[in-house]
Image (tube, rainbow, N blue to C red):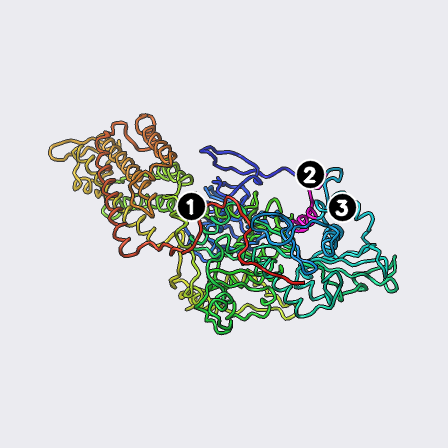
Amino acid sequence: MIPAKTHVIRERKLESIQSADVVAGDVLFLRMGDKIPADCYVFSSSDLKVDNSSLTGESEPQERGAGNTMRNPLEATNLAFNGTLAVSGEAYAIVGVETLGAITLLATDKTGTLTRNQMTVCNVWTNGIMYAATRGHNDMGEPISDVTAMGIREVLYTSALCRSVKFDRTDVSMDKRQLLGDATESGLVRFAGMRLGDEFDELLPRHAKVFEIPFNSANKWMLSIHRLPHASGALALLIKGAPERVLRLCSTILSGGAAVPLTDIQRAQYDETYEYMASQGHRVLAFAQLQLDGSEYPDGYAFDRKKENYPVGGYTFVGLTSLEDPPKHGVREAIGRCRSAGIQVMMVTGDHPLTAEAIGRKINLVLGETREGVAKRTGRPVEDIGEDEFDAVVIHGERIADMTDDDWDMVFRKPEVIFARTSPKNKLEIVARAQSLGHICGVTGDGVNDSPALKKADLGIAMNESGSDVSKEAASMIILDDNFASIVKGIEEGRLIFANLKKSIRYTLTHSTPEVIPQILYIIVPLPPMITSIMILVIDLGFEIFAALTYAWEPPESANGLMKLPPRKPVTMRSIAQLRARNARQPQVSIDPATGKPIKESLVARILRTLRAPFTKVWWQDLTEKTEGEILVDGDLLSWSYLEAGLISTISLVVVFFVILNHHGISPKQARLMAKATDEDYFNKDSPDYTYNGRLFTGEDQFYALNEARTGVIFSIYILQVFNLFICKARLRLPFGKFMFRNVRTFYGFSAGLLLLVFITYIPPLNSVFNSSYKSIPLYWLIAVGFGFLLLAYATARMLVLRKSKPIRWNPTIDGLHMHPTVWSTRHTTRSIEVTA
């Protein structure tokens, strides 16, 4: 098939590219017949209409342009969606990182996103002894000097045999091989290969695998059965996985060189060791085995997973292994920036709660105490700790199914939240609960099982390097370098795009008032027509387009200003209560009793409901209810554009218009009388002569005087808009300073507009087309310049007043954030542990 094409503006050039190459931030040029290549914001339109029937079922083309008053995104008049068709008109639009910039909650995976996904074995606990796999000043335990030692041999054999990792080649040493598979398993395999040497490659051929149950998110362990002869048979079962899951299957433990019954003392040793390993931020795996009785499971026995004709308990617990996956460089600062931006960052991981918490404390995710931490510090029972005494919570995935609505509310009220030992189903539930509170939720994921949560999220973010094709297909965005810091950059870019889009709309709408009021004065007063239709087209499709587009390249006002503001729609107690009240007011959706799914409303029913809505109390209540957060087109923007700057610009053009007419001997009063005359048509070339104060004005005199005044009007609008172009750059700061001049394209934009005006003014043949005059004197433009400085002074005073009456809401400072660069990570021990045999 021929790939679809679309038009984009890149580096100030209009290019035709493949639709698949469109990226977030691209400026699109849409015209009749185009297929919309991506979700986008329309910021400038000339009668654009889109066919949304493939998306909403609406058969009538929908008008699209700058500005929106609809709450439903599918009905928003400034949004065009991927796959819909432009059936008429044309428009400029910018592609969909808006959601990333609006995120209020980010649920992120740990492995591969926050950490490097490079697992290294650190400690092995077996046979009652702690071993150190590597040597360093913080390593605890005995060195592994004998790989045939009881327990060590079993851990190495299980790592080498009970695996699904593959190699790119086997004719080189282990350290030169590329491992294809899970990072945790790869770390174990590499550890076994380095310790066993040449014996590693001989193990699997010698001890063939006869049965296997791969790791899955439900069991959280992997099991395999091998031809591994022993005194009572030829087969042995090997298993590795989540410690608490594996321990449940065990009745004995390897201790003192033999398998002994699992007692409370040994369970206490296990708990203490497990807690120590997890508290270091290590991922911990347990190992167990069972030597199968040859009389019950002879060599050649047909194991069947569905029949479960294999032992499901009574195993011998071999030991624990901890692996370190250090945080990525830059993650700590990135999470700190997210939290400073008012975004709640949650870790959702399959690791043990202590492991997740330890990593969270290294990367600015957790700073405060948990309920358990407060209880331990104060010596009180956990049940006696009040909700206001701790800021951090670590929720085990097994608790999620039993959590009530109040429990969820309590969790999301905490600033620091970790969900550990979670399943894909848990992740989906977390996203749904967050969205029910009004959160704009972003979710990261890389596995097949993450797909439902990625689809459910407002913004699903997949990993490129470690992500599966299914997760990439389900996601809205793919992070090419698998780095969390890239997500934060995207959030900042999304906020910048929204801010610049708002500035562009604020600027563009301002010229509407000086275009409309002269037309009203022409009809009501009446006055001579100050501006013609062709001049309005020159303004709207000429210099305004050049200037408005330059905001696409506008840098932020300050380095970190945007990331210190709260999200556009922050979630607060008030907003949650408001959302729930709004949902309670809405009519209940009819459910099909046969399928249990909502009954789809017919087109006629939707139209009737839409027509009846304005006559209901609920509709008006929803419309007039004041909501928290920032919208693209708000009252402040409209007031500035239409009333304040618009009126100053209008006054400027009226003054310029009458000053130029007066220069030609026509006073404002006389101009009004001439325009009001019903028996004669003045200000045309063939108009009758007109005598005023003894001076004769022929038709040509009237015509050229009016055109020169009109030329002054269009230059007046241009000059005021140049001042407005710079004024609208300032939102967080006063409209002065170097930041206003950093965007060099601003100068290109208004220079292009100036060249256009000069071109249509001082090339005489064009005067008759554009109602301009080559005799126009630039001296009169100084009047507009004076009004431009007046506009600048007014904007400054206005901003100072608003700072007092409506100060900018900055995010509160979070104490304890570590924002210095994460250059390297080292393991460290916070306390010692003594384990007796």
What residue does disc 3 label?
Answer: 200
Name the residue that disc number 2 marks. 176
Instruction: Name the kind of residue labelled 1 in the image.
Output: Leu
Residue 476 on image: x %, y %: 56, 49
Q: Is residue 565 above or below residue 546?
A: below
Q: Which residues are magenta?
A: 173-191
Residue at x 17%, y 40% (from the top left corner): 670
Residue highlighted by disc 1: 496
- Front one among 747 and 37: 747
- Amino acid type, residue under disc 3 in the picture: Phe
The residue positioned 72% from the left and 64% from the top of the image is 253
- The answer to whether any part of residue 519 appears in the image is no
Mark number, residue 303: none
Say left or right for 706 vs 303: left
The disc, 3 or 2, on the residue closer to the chain's N-terminal end is: 2
Q: Which tag, 1 or 3, sits closer to the chain's start? A: 3
- How many numbered callouts? 3
Location of residue 146 with respect to 778 vertically, above or below: below
- The residues bearing labels 2 and 1 have C-alpha atoms spaced at a distance of 45 Å
Nearer to us of marks 2 and 1 is: 2
Farthest residue to the left: give it.
Answer: 694
Q: CA distance from mark 3 to mark 2?
A: 15 Å
Q: Are marks 3 and 2 in contact (CB under 8 Å)?
A: no
User: Which is more N-terminal, label 1 or label 2?
Assistant: 2
